[in-house]
Image (cartoon, grey):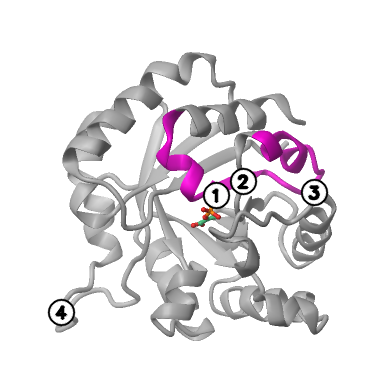
Amino acid sequence: MRRRLVAGNWKMHGSRASIQALLGSILAGLGDAGGAECAVCVPYPYLQLVAERLKGTRIAWGAQNVSEHAQGAYTGEVSAAMLAELGCKYALVGHSERRQLYGETDAQVAAKFAAAHGAGLTPILCVGETLAERDAGRTDEVVARQLDAVLAKCGKEAVAKSVVAYEPVWAIGTGRTASPGQAQAVHAFARKRLAPATRILYGGSVKPDNAAAIFAMADVDGGLIGGASLAAEDFLAILRGAGSAG
Ligand code: PEP
């Protein structure tokens, strides 16, 4: 049985004050939020704050990116060892915004995955097709290529100890969600390439009103939540959806 995970991606949002308030509200409502695992991936400057606030709670924390390099002259980058030292459990790797806006390649994403895994972090590997790729019938090919780059470098066992997030680019921040059936089809396809125990999250405009139906799909093991994770009530409702499904 794969344990469900709901991870928030706060992207480049927040301030010390707003993050304190958001964490306070999430922690206050957590008792009724079901049994799914929970994590938040926050901007680097807030990791220390989040680590202090969440220590000893059931919410894990992580970063939204990580360098592929261990150390050296890479101005502005943050290594996996630095994140591990801060108590991060997770690091997002290959989020579509990183791939699209910062030109991260499959090879670079695989190197980031290897660095995170090697430092004892749990990478959350994001994969997914653009709308043009879906319309051209290339969804499976793109997801396979993105997964295979990491599988070839790190192997199935490393990926099984990590988390994969299927995030169709056309559904991220657009309000347009993949239907439960569309999500399940890609998750089932991805699972064939992965060890059976690998957790595969769905991400892309998950909201309280669609979460339970998506999480009810056999190969969906939870969610990566962007916009809705910035509102405590919505995030808690999605967590409840993960707890009640399956
Ligand atoms: C994301 O940023 O990974 C994401 C899924 O965003 P949203 O939920 O806002 O679509």
Q: How far across and down, in percent of the image, does residue 230 sit?
A: 41, 41
Q: CA distance from mark 1 to mark 2?
A: 8 Å
Residue contact at pointers 2 and 3, CB within 8 angstroms = no
Name the front one of labels 4 and 1. Answer: 1
Q: How far across and down, in percent of the image, does residue 100 sit?
A: 48, 79
Q: CA distance from mark 3 to mark 4?
A: 42 Å
User: First in sequence: mark 2 or mark 3?
Assistant: 3
Which residue lies under the disc numbered 1? 224
Q: Residue at x 48, y 14 (%)?
A: 31
Q: Which residues are magenta?
A: 209-232
How many C-alpha atoms fall within 10 Å of the one at disc 2: few (<14), some, or many (≥20)? many
User: First in sequence: mark 4 or mark 1?
Assistant: 4
Residue contact at pointers 1 and 2, CB within 8 angstroms = yes
Looking at the image, residue 166 lies above or below residue 154: above
Give the numbered dot on residue 75: 4
On screen, residue 151 versus residue 65, left or right, reads: right
User: First in sequence: mark 2 or mark 4?
Assistant: 4
The secondary structure type at the circle numbered 2 is loop
